[in-house]
Image: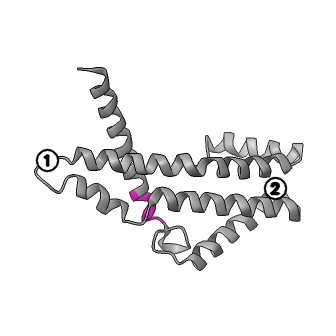
Amino acid sequence: MKPWIRRSLIGLAGATIALGGLTACGHRMHHGGWGADATPEQAAQWRGKVVERIAGKLDLNAEQKAKLTVLGDKLHAQRLAVRGATDPRAEVQSLIAGRQFDRAKAQALVQQKADAVKSGSPEVIAALGDFYDSLDAAQQQKVRDFIERRRGWGRG
């Protein structure tokens, strides 16, 4: 198999997994502001609750809390940009709707998602860096301990 074909297939498989994950995540938020069907007010209220919870656990001051709020807003904007304006499940289903897998549409979809990540990442990284750098040594250690206990951000 030619290397470019193998890379394309691996990329497509990765994109399919990522899109499946995004599709699954889109259905989690029906109870509190994280789903695609949440209003901007519900999403903001949910992010506010998360900020309050983190602020309480890390004993954040007002400046740190403001930086955490900015980080939450940037992450939310990045998530919306990656998700796009259409339903991720419908996008994936449209790839297999015909007799053959729509390779061109899949590649365009992957490129769209990659472009969204690439364009929004600098802002997210800057906001995360600003927040983390504003923490004192004890607060930073709490964050590291939390991540170690959870083995990453997304596991429960």
46, 90: nearer the viewer: 90
- Residue identifier under label 1: 100
Specify which label sits upstream in the sequence, 2 or 1. 2
Q: Position of residue 146 (x, y in %)?
A: 71, 46
- Picture quarter containing residue 103? top left
The amino acid type of the residue labelled 1 equals Gln
The amino acid type of the residue labelled 2 equals Leu
Q: Residue at x 19, y 46 (%)?
A: 101
Q: Residue at x 31, y 25 (%)?
A: 4
Side (left or right) of 74 relative to 23: right
54 over 103 or under it: above or below: below
- Residue identifier under label 2: 58
Quadrant location, the N terminus: top left
Q: Residues within 10 Å of mark 2 (few under 14, many from 20)?
A: some
Q: Residue at x 70, y 71 (%)?
A: 48
Please tell me whether mark 2 sits on a helix, a strand or a loop. Answer: helix
Q: Position of residue 24 (x, y in %)?
A: 40, 58
Quick one: which residue is furthest to the left in this view? 99
Side (left or right) of 102 relative to 150: left
135 over 87 or under it: above or below: above
Q: What secondary structure is the magenta-colored segment mainly?
A: helix
Q: Position of residue 3 (x, y in %)?
A: 31, 21
Segment colored magenta: 23-28
Q: Is residue 76 part of the magenta span, yes or no?
A: no
143, 129: nearer the viewer: 129
Please tell me whether mark 1 sits on a helix, a strand or a loop. Answer: loop
Disc 2 from disc 1: Cα separation: 52 Å
Q: Residues within 10 Å of mark 1 (few under 14, many from 20)?
A: few
